[in-house]
Image (cartoon, grey):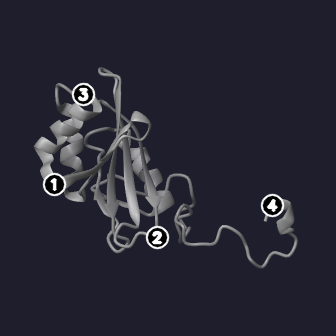
Amino acid sequence: MTNQSVAESIVKKFGDDVYDFEEPFGFLTLSVTRDQIIALLTYLKEDATFQFNFLTDITGVHSPENPGREFCVVYHLHSFVNNFRARVKVFLNAEDIHIPTATELWASANWMERETYDFFGIIFDGHPNLKRILNMEDMDYHPMRREYPLEDATREDKIDALFGR
């Protein structure tokens, strides 16, 4: 199995719903529309050739500098049978950060989706128990969003020269 053969098979099945194929460090990476994410994950998991039977991780990325694509949900998949890995991305608009849950495919998606919701606020529609997993329920923000400055500009106890500035 090669990145090329997997990519060709995916394009043949999903057409224009899959795009942005890349191979950073030889790692097959592609993007898919939100409407087709579950169909694509199901195909990759259940197809006899691919057998991506292990969901390594689900996480989020917040890029407020990309209008219309501020949020990204990233799935890392592994086929133990073929010793092959792939990364699948779904970009979301900040005004609509809903995506279908993958808990029907992998039980482990439950906690990964809860963590992604907790830190990024991405809502996994159909999730059986979508609530915070590591932070307190009464937090009114999602800490991994890039909505706040990295440093407190009002601090006076910090000497910039000590930080190479």
Give the Cα distance between marks 2 and 3.
Answer: 35 Å
For residue 98, above or below residue 105 = below
The residue indicated by pointer 1 is: 16
Confirm or deny contact between disc 4 and disc 2 (CB under 8 A): no
- Please tell me whether mark 3 or mark 4 is closer to you in this view: 4
Q: Earlier in the sequence, mark 2 or mark 1?
A: 1
- Say few, some or many: other residues with alpha carbon within 10 Å of mark 3 (under 14 / 14 to 19 / 20 or more): many
* The C terminus - image quarter: bottom right
Residue at mark 4 to residue at mark 2: CA–CA distance: 26 Å
Residue located 25% across and 58% down the image = 34
Query: Mark 1 to mark 3: distance in Å?
Result: 23 Å
Which residue matches tag 2? 64
Side of 82 where 132 appears, left or right:
right
Of the residues under marks 1 and 3, which one precedes in the sequence?
1
Front: mark 1 or 3: 1
Residue 119 position, x and y percent, is 51, 58
| Mark 2 and mark 1: Cα distance apart in space | 25 Å
Give the amino acid at mark 4. Phe
Q: Earlier in the sequence, mark 4 or mark 1?
A: 1
Residue nearest the viewer, comparing 108 with 64: 64
> Badge 3 is on which residue?
51
Q: Which mark is residue 163?
A: 4
